[in-house]
Amino acid sequence: QRSSNELYLRCQEFGCEQSLLSRPDGSASFVQGDTSVMAGVYGPAEVKVSKEIYDRATLEVLVQPKVGLPSVRERSQEQCVRETCEASLLLTLHPRSSLTLILQVLHDDGSLLSCCLNAACMALMDAGLPMSCLFCGVTCAISTDGQIITDPTAAQEKESRALMTFAIDSAKHSVLMSSTKGSFSVHELQQCIAVSQKASEKIFQFYRDSVKRRYSKSL
Amino acid sequence: MKDTPLSNCERDFLLKAIEEKKRLDGRQTYDYRKIKISFGTDYGCCFVDLGQTRVMAQVSCELVAPKENRPNEGIMFFNIELSPMASPGFEQGRQSELSVKLNRQLERCLRNSKCIDTESLCVVSGEKVWQIRVDVHTLNNDGNLMDAASIAAITALCHFRRPDVSTQGQEVTVYSPEERDPIPLSIYHMPISVSFAFFQQGTYLLVDPCEREERVMDGLLVIAMNKHREICSIQSSGGIMLLKEQVMRCSKIAGVKVSEITELINEALLNDRKARKAGGKCGFAESMPQERITALKKDETPVEMTDVTETANGIIQKGEAAPQTVPSPVVPVPGVGQVGQGLQNSWGLEDDDEDDYEEEKNDNSGDEQVEEVTKMDVGEGDVVEISDSEEEEVVILNPEVPEKPKNTGSKSHQKGAAASKKRQKK
């Protein structure tokens, strides 16, 4: 049902559960279609002297794949998530402390990095860490005939010409992080960013609904 | 990160309560916590909740060459990953003592008991066999990781389906799941481990210790059994002295518990098989409890994107035009390329570098060079000796000039055709 002037892009079904693990300070699991990621946060806690920073907290992100040991791919995903979190967390409120964010991939069916970002944000919220804004991740794929698909599945990702993931913040809907693969024009990039900003509104609304439901009994 | 140390009053409280036959969560001495088994979307993925302890197991397979001394048998590989998510004391990558102990115990329980028929994993004898890899990830540690891991591992192995293969002489064809249905592994029996914690030098015993109880226990006895009451492995650690009757009593208790757990596993496998046959979606997403207040699920919604193209166009127009002067590589002579012509050397040694900087072809003549030419007023046609002067030149080998090129790393410039200083010989 796509015509040339109207674009309706599918937003996958979301599911989220918070505080599902008893040991971590904050935990969340986020489900996007078939892709699911579990996140756990510890912090602020004691930090090793070799890693401490005198005026802010040290954030460490670990991505655990489902099969095998973490490799370079997980390291690059960790860097993307860490830079997004550092941009939105108020790290200067906890100097010389450590914040550890662990992401466990439960099932990967495409859009993994954006699912990790969403799970990370919900876990940080659950842990009660002070943040200047919330963030969410949106993945766009450009198919071989030029159509933009949001939240692609693994099959759609494989056939796409370009794959982009953006982290969008909730305050100004600006781009916090971008990670792209493949070739695309400047025009297509700007279109994808605009698409991601639109899709991020849905995700932020979902965050609000989850938290409202969670505190509906206690307020 | 370090684990929070246990305070003395907590320790005393726990020990006193155990002496009075009371447990923190109200269980009896021989009671297990509530076990919940669920499966993921693909075959071989299993989640086990033992009270608050959560683990996930994933089974995968790969065709490899077999071991030298066992050319007819497949290979099993086990790995328990103590994720930092499970406990603040676990560190990524470090092989702690607990990790070694758990891995070894799981291997003894599953590999040495020969519960999987490894000969059926052979495809071409001596060349290609299936390697079955079991990864157990600990998600939350509330005590008794060993039992949870063993339940998860054996359930995942029962749930797993490997691709079908056919051999025609030396050719092996592996069929994808769409072409031919994958086939399950052949499993003889299901060994499950049961843990007993001992306190006060073996006087008191508790089955399925939780995390607090594990911290104050003196010793641990792990018995792996199957439902036919065959003991697959026994391990006692902690240095406690156990009497023969105690060990016999524990093995009887283990027999009862194992048969209960095996029934639970079979029921879960059956339910999953029925759900998959009915065609419904299975996976972690489905097993998420919807009625909890901390969980929310939202269905697919279309997102309207009508003004996306206009927004994108607006942004591009407002943005700056691309710079007209794009530095592109320049080729002065065949074999030499240069990027960034006419740039000053910014490496800090300003005085005697720019002198021999005659640019042969290019438009910007040496007006940037403020420094005077100290040496090398070599006119055209002169032969430059390859002398031992401190001022070294780079000579370009031209077809007409039979001089040897002498590349230098002069003045900390990198060697390379593209941005090195050169002196042209005509």
Image (cartoon, coloured by chain):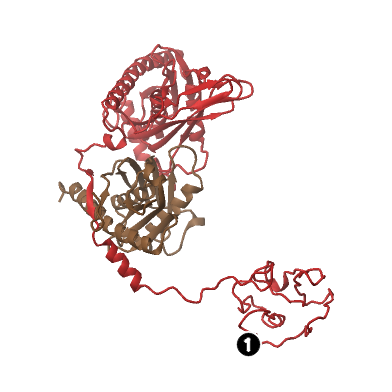
The relative height of residue B173 versus residue B329 in the rendered view (above or below) is above
Q: Where is residue B58 in the image (x, y as percent from the top left)?
A: 42, 32
Percent position (x, y) of residue B366? 65, 85
Q: In this view, does B160 lie to the left or right of B414?
A: left
Identify the secondary structure beneath mark 1.
loop
Residue that carries the numbered disc 1 in the rendered image: B367
Q: Position of residue B347 (x, y in %)?
A: 64, 75
- Above-or-below relation of A162 to B246: below
Q: In this view, does B64 lie to the left or right of A57?
A: right
| Camera-nearest residue between B263 and B119 | B119
Task: Determine the colour of chain A.
Answer: brown
Tag 1: Cα neighbours inside 10 Å, few (<14), some, or many (≥20)?
A: few
Pick the front one: B82 or B307:
B307
- Measuring from the top left, give residue A126's x and y in whole percent: 29, 50
Q: In this view, does B162 lie to the left or right of B412?
A: left
Q: Which chain is red?
A: B
The reply to whether residue A97 is in sight is no
Chain label for disc 1: B
